[in-house]
């Protein structure tokens, strides 16, 4: 690998990590000539063409950017970092590629997004669900919000089976 700084082809790999759900290998390199460090990314040259089957039966190419855009809209002005959004997108893709080879339904993509958003930010989850699920009336939306609140309350309640004894 040629160093981007001195253009010499003498380097050594000092760290390798999997990223983007295992589809990319990130390598940190050290140039033996100029002593600078740089990062390279290695991925399969031929990408698998995945199609998304929409509700009306139309097939469109899968685009990660659309998933990320939907997540960003749901997380707008919420305490969810750009890194968390990318991580959620990675998890959605892992779900997709673990279960499908060539075609995936938009319903599966949406369900996966909702599941991962729900564990990160309940408000972002409700925003996403309100668009994705296309509720027929306000009652359905209120039921969904009520369920999210109940889950949050249950997670915050202290356990009845504490290992520690109360202070006397």
Image: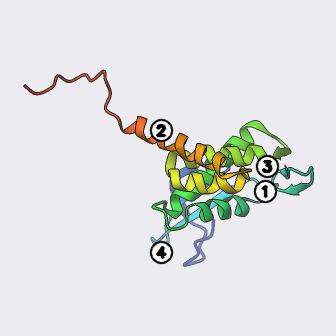
> Which numbered marker is on residue 86?
none
Give the label, 3 or 1, closer to the camera. 3
Whole-angstrom CA distance, mark 4 to mark 2, is 58 Å
Q: Residues within 10 Å of mark 3 (few under 14, many from 20)?
A: some
Residue of label 1: 45
Residue nearer the viewer, 146 or 24: 146
> In the displayed structure, would residue 72 be above or below residue 97?
below
Residue projecting furthest to the left: 168
* Residue designated by label 4: 34
Q: Nearer the viewer, mark 2 or mark 3?
A: 2
Q: Of circles 4 and 2, which is in front? A: 2
Tell me what residue is drawn at x 58 percent, y 58 percent: 86
Q: Residues within 10 Å of mark 2 (few under 14, many from 20)?
A: few
Question: Is disc 1 placed on a helix, strand or loop?
Answer: loop
Q: CA distance from mark 3 to mark 4?
A: 49 Å
Pointer 2 or 3: first along the chain:
3
The x, y position of residue 103, in whole percent, is: 85, 45
The residue labelled by disc 2 is 150
Is the C-beta separation of discs 2 and 3 under 8 Å?
no
Q: Is residue 22 visible?
A: no
How far is the residue under mark 2 from the one under mark 1? 46 Å
Are there few (<14), some (14-19), or many (20+) residues within 10 Å of tag 4? some
Disc 1 and disc 4: Cα gap in Å?
Answer: 30 Å
Residue located 67% across and 44% down the image: 112
Disc nearer the start of the sequence (3/1) = 1
- Closer to the camera in the image, 149 or 69: 149
Residue 106 numbered tag: 3
Closer to the chain start, of discs 2 and 1, is: 1
Which quarter of the rendering shows the C terminus?
top left
Q: Nearer the viewer, mark 3 or mark 4?
A: 3
Image quadrant occupied by the N terminus: bottom right
């Amino acid at each position: 690998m040629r160093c981007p700084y001195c253009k010499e082809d003498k380097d050594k790999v000092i760290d390798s990590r999997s990223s983007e759900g295992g589809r990319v290998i990130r390598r940190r390199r050290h140039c033996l000539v100029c002593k600078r460090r740089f990062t390279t990314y290695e991925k399969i040259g031929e990408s698998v063409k995945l199609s998304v089957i929409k509700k009306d039966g139309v097939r469109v190419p899968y685009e990660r950017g659309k998933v990320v855009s939907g997540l960003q809209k749901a997380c707008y002005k919420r305490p969810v970092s750009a890194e968390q959004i990318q991580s959620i997108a990675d998890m959605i893709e892992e779900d997709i590629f673990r279960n499908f080879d060539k075609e995936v339904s938009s319903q599966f993509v949406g369900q996966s997004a909702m599941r991962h958003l729900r564990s990160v930010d309940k408000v972002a989850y409700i925003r996403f669900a309100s668009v994705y699920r296309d509720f027929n009336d306000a009652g359905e939306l209120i039921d969904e919000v009520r369920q999210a609140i109940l889950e949050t309350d249950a997670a915050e309640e202290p356990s009845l089976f504490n290992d520690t004894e109360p202070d006397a």
